[in-house]
Amino acid sequence: MSAVRAWLRHSLLWIYLVLGGLFVFVVLSTRQELGLFEEPLFLISQILVFGVVATIITAAYRMRKLLQNRLSLIGIVLVLFFAAIAIAAPWLAPPENPREPYRIVRCGYTHMPQPPRGDNPLEQIWKIITKQETICEARPFGLIQSYDIYYGIVWGTSMAFFVGLVLTGLNVLIGLVIGSLGAYFGRWVDEILMRITDIFLAFPFLVAAITLAAVLQPSLGRGLLTAMVALTVFGWMSYARLIRGDILAIKERDYVYAAHAIGAPHYRVLLRHIIPNAIYPTLVVGSMDIGSYVLNFAALSFLGLGAEIGFADWGQMISFARDWIPRLSDHWYIVVYPGMAILLFVLGWNLIGDAFRDILDPRLKGAK
Amino acid sequence: MKAVWRWGALAAALALVLGVTSGLAQIKNPDTYIEAVIGDLETLDPAWHYDTSSATAIFNIYETLVFYDGEAIDKFVPMLAESWTVSPDGSTYTFKIRKGVKFHLGGDLTPEDVAYSFQRALLQDRSGGPIHMIIEHVLDVASIDELAKKVGDAQACQQVLNAIRVTGPDTVEIKLASPFGPFIQILAGSWTSIIDKEWAIGLGDWDGKCDNWRKWWDPKAEASKLFDKANGTGPYKLVKWDKGKELILERNDNYWGGLAKRPAILKNYIRKVVPEWGTRLAIFEAGDADSIDVPRPFVAAMEPLVKAGKARMHGPLPGNIMQSAFINFKVKEGSAYMPKLGGADKPDLLLDLNLRRALNYCFDTATYIKESWLGEAKPINGVIIEGRLGYNPEQKGYEFSLAKCEEELKAAWGGKLWSDGMRLILTFNQGNIARRFAAEMLERNLEDMNKKRPGRPIFSVDVLDLPWPTYLKAMDAGELAVFWVGWLEDYAHPHNWVHPYMFRTGSFAIGQNFSTLKDVEFKPVYATFLEAKKYPTLQDLFDDLVVKAKKEPDQRKGGRAEKIYFELNRLAVEYAINIQNIQLQVRRYEQIWVKGWFYNPAYPGTYVYWLSKG
Amino acid sequence: MLAYIIRRLLLLPILLLGVTIFVFAVFALLSPEMRASLYLADVPKSPDAMDRIIKKYGLDQPIHIQYWQWLNQVIRGDLGWSKTAQRPVSEALLYYLPATLELSLWAMLPVILVGIWLGILSAVHQDKLIDHTMRVFALVGWSLPTFVFGLLMLMYFYARLQWFPPGQISDWVTREVINGSFIRYTQMYTIDAILNWRWDVFWDSLRHLIMPVITLSYVQWALLLRVTRSSMLETLRQEYIMTARAKGLKESVVINKHAARNAMIPVATMGGLLLIGLLNGVVITETIFNYPGIGRWAADAAIRLDILSVIGFTLFNGVLLVVGNLIVDVLYAFIDPRVRLE
């Protein structure tokens, strides 16, 4: 038994090494032409994607159930597939202007959708990868508003990881701070923080985000920042409540009393003893919300409050398609490709989350 | 294809079960004209409204003294005025008011109603409203408030009552502060609609006296007593304005006869607000709307319907909107959109004529119109659109030429621009796709020049779309260097073009700063009756010519006014005050069963009186 | 329990005050010129227009003074004017609410019925094909952007088949309302149709409701299905279920009579979440289907920076959530005696 475990650990190590090597390769080989350090967005999202891959592989090793369950297996395959696209973006769709890889390649000046070229999109993509044709020549998925859909989807994958993970991270972090402070100090601190939480809960999430995005747009401009701020300000409340409940339960444990007794300062008790023991459920719930953040971001984009025009973002590509949907039989490609991308991406996360929850739900322990 | 078949079969089966009937090919709602439009009206108060949606409703309900003669925009027929005369000096208009006209709620039309309507409009003068057009000519001030501050409230009101008064049992006289040839044009606009004096006073609106008119001055939309009520003399009367949803009008069966000496043909007129384009199209395809608003980019979606004979298309027709990029000769200090020359802030970067000309040469108008406007726009050299007095088809502009663009760039700022590089921000309002294309085309062509000047600091050109509030604020503060705007004319006369584009107090003057350009030589080419002269600034030159053209009594084609307008067009091109102006063309789509529609560019929307179905 | 209810209700004004202060603070980020643009649809055509508008609406005053004025107004019962709805805010709420309520109530129906039914089905057949299918079906709904789904429906069932039109009601009904032959008691067409005993109107209203209801509810099924399923799985392992089975009761009786009832307790608490979900969902659904409800109004107002409308909507929403959650809490205490409210 221990031999198997050692072997597992060993092979995990192997995988980490391979991933690390790949990461270094990607960074080094794209450093020059992508201006990684002038436009850090790509670098950050690469780090995030590699983190996701490593986490998923680790989780799958630890919980074999994730692989045995067909649904979560599909979910894992989907997310890894998108991760591969995000990692390989510079080769799958070479940017036109390397300083701005997230700006979708534009081929012309018309808003009319342009159909894909060639019969087989894969063949066209191959031509791009092998540099036989430029993106504007190959157009594997067609054009909308003169923007290349294929390019938008490839780089939008990287963006979707960024948006989903960063939004989740920020919201969990804020929830963590507010929830743990309230629960730990109790009394009036708790009262004030929880009333603030109540105030934010009084806004329905999407309407509140729309309002804030609309108000911020004139000062921050239309873009990633505005939409992400809007989705963060109103997103943290459920995590705050969750972590607060968990800490309240843990606060009374013996080892916390012991820490107090030996005179550990507040921050140390909180950071060392309480949060590490209480954070797990919140992290799990957070990871299950990644998909819904991507959807909410897309909804903002759909209403014209998301990423700036021409920025590789799936939600925006669908919002381009919005006005052509009545003629979809002619222009199916403008909604099918980005629509599929967002559906499969979110579905992948939700499948994993669903299985995760099944496995972790304490009430279901003992069920087969 | 197969999947579609299967779905179709399933659909057919379900349709049988549900008993749903398809309404194809039969006329839906034969006695009602239904329009599906983007936005709702703002108000039903004629003096308050300044948007085409409200104007469409109002000109179907209310009537003006004169109206456009058929498709003409510069010929007028009597409407509520039986006839009118203009004094020889061109400053006094006398109208003989039609007898036997009744308002929808029963009142008789009298000269008092006419005078009251004008006086009320002038005294209301809401901020950002349409009345400044009339006040400018009748009182020679920008607003009634300005006059009141000069001469006092009571005196200002008295001046209004003196300028517009009942002079006989059936005559009303309007006196202008100075003659203005196209004044009758303004009187055909829906903002001078005639309302019933007794009815308005009964609702609590201005009482016709001078002691406390300020009570009704500059109201908020909803504070106007006529905000959601209407009582006109027109072919349709108000049934219900369900705000945000629809406007329902019904035929006025006691109509005095109007232009065709008959009541309207269709019994009802419904104007539905459907902001989502896809939904609007779906409503049209189902036959539930007789016509819909079709935004420019989506005309292609209508093509199959027209080809299949399911819809009729009028157009492309010359519109009354021009899209222009304005150039700021001196950007306000501290602007976030500050141009740079060689790395240093340069507020007056665009003061250089070579650079302004380069921007024009680098803009590929033909490709832009072909791709972004699907071929349906007309390049205008100058500031006056085709179809108006003063449009000069002979006027030459800047042909697209990267070589000439390069040449001008090399000459700009005595060669400093070429050697040291520049930074320029091109701005437009968010969501406007066509303007984005224009800006990006210019960006690409200018940045491509960097390839011809390797090793030098680059030309950095940025395209920036600003949310409407930010855009408006920056424009109003003169902070934008190059900005795209469309101008929709208020009335069909060149004065309404040269004034906003070139005049000192015009809408865009604050974002242009023509007075930065000093010592301007003027040598007339067309208007040879004018003397060659040196002006202290470019703005003074423009102002002088705009005023001269406006006061010129000879407003005929080939007359002196036209020559001065030619001159203004020429100057606009030679000084490159804009980047390629483009007159937009319009289309109208309607159901095949709609009859009687014709195009008059001065109509704000559909005049249902002409229409029938069948 | 009474004390609990009173405490919660006393918190309501504090909450609402906090909400309004927050909204005003957010709008303080905008300069007067930016806020004036709500009243300028076009480039200002006269030179002094912008300044006059700012003065007229008092936009240049410090935000705390504006807030104070607004608060005074509210105390006198005036929520201000909604520029977006072209009517007073309080009237706008009353005007748009019935439509959204009608839509939400109809959407609750399939959400609850189908969600619970599928959840039970899924739990009973755990890890069988049907369980997988149901879960995938629900998860796809949860992963699908509302706007894509809604527009696809519109394109097929209206544009092509002409079965279900967008909007709220057909024109002929509107005309009957205007001439008085159809009376709107509740402002909800389906209910009014029954009260008027007019099945043609009922059918017409239903036809307008079907597409938005499906769009709205498809997204929400997943939530309920998940809760029902896990609650049901837990209940099925309880001893009394084993006992019931051991007694030889039929499986259907065990599930329907014994298990399902007890499994419903946690599901009942989902009411609040469901309401939030629906209120969020209506924004985009109403926009797509041109349905004149409160969500479309709120989104419009937000995009146009119409502060008074946004506040009005948020206040309404805050009250709704607090009272709604309170009712759920109290109900829960009644259903499940183990719960004590402090």
Image: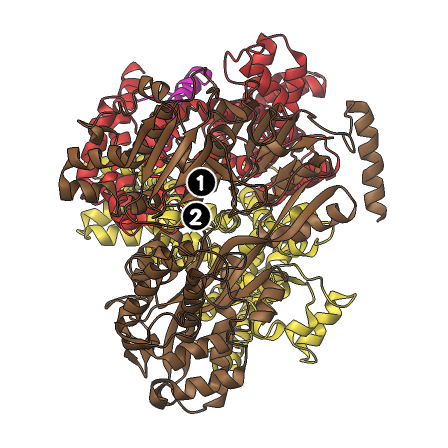
Marks 2 and 1: in contact by CB < 8 Å?
yes
Picture quadrant of residue B475: bottom left
Write down which chain is painted brown: B
Residue B425 spot, x, y in % from top left: 39, 70
**Is residue A149 something that shows in the picture?**
yes
Queried whether the magenta region covers residue C333, the answer comes back as yes
Q: Quick one: quadrant of the C terminus of chain C? A: top left
The correct choice, above or below, for A78 with respect to B212 in the image is below
In the image, which residues are magenta? C314-342
Q: Which mark is residue B38?
A: none
Residue at 38 percent of width and 52 percent of height: C43
On the rendered structure, is C98 left or right of C41? right
- Pinpoint residue C148: horizontal percent, then vertical percent: 61, 45
Q: Is residue B301 above or below residue B533?
A: above
In the picture as drawn, the residue positioned furthest to the front comes out as B88
Chain identifier, red in the render: C
Q: Quadrant of residue B17?
A: top right
Residue type at tag 1: Gly
Task: Residue C146 in the image: state x and y as whole percent.
Answer: 58, 42
Question: Is residue B274 positioned above or below B414 on the image?
Answer: above
Check chain identity for marks 1 and 2: say if they share one. yes
Which chain does the numbered disc 2 sit on? B
Residue B208 coordinates in the image, percent (x, y): 26, 25
Among the chains pictured, the one given yellow colouring is A
| Overall secondary structure of the magenta section | helix
Mark 2 secondary-structure assignment: loop
Q: Which residue is mark 2?
A: B490
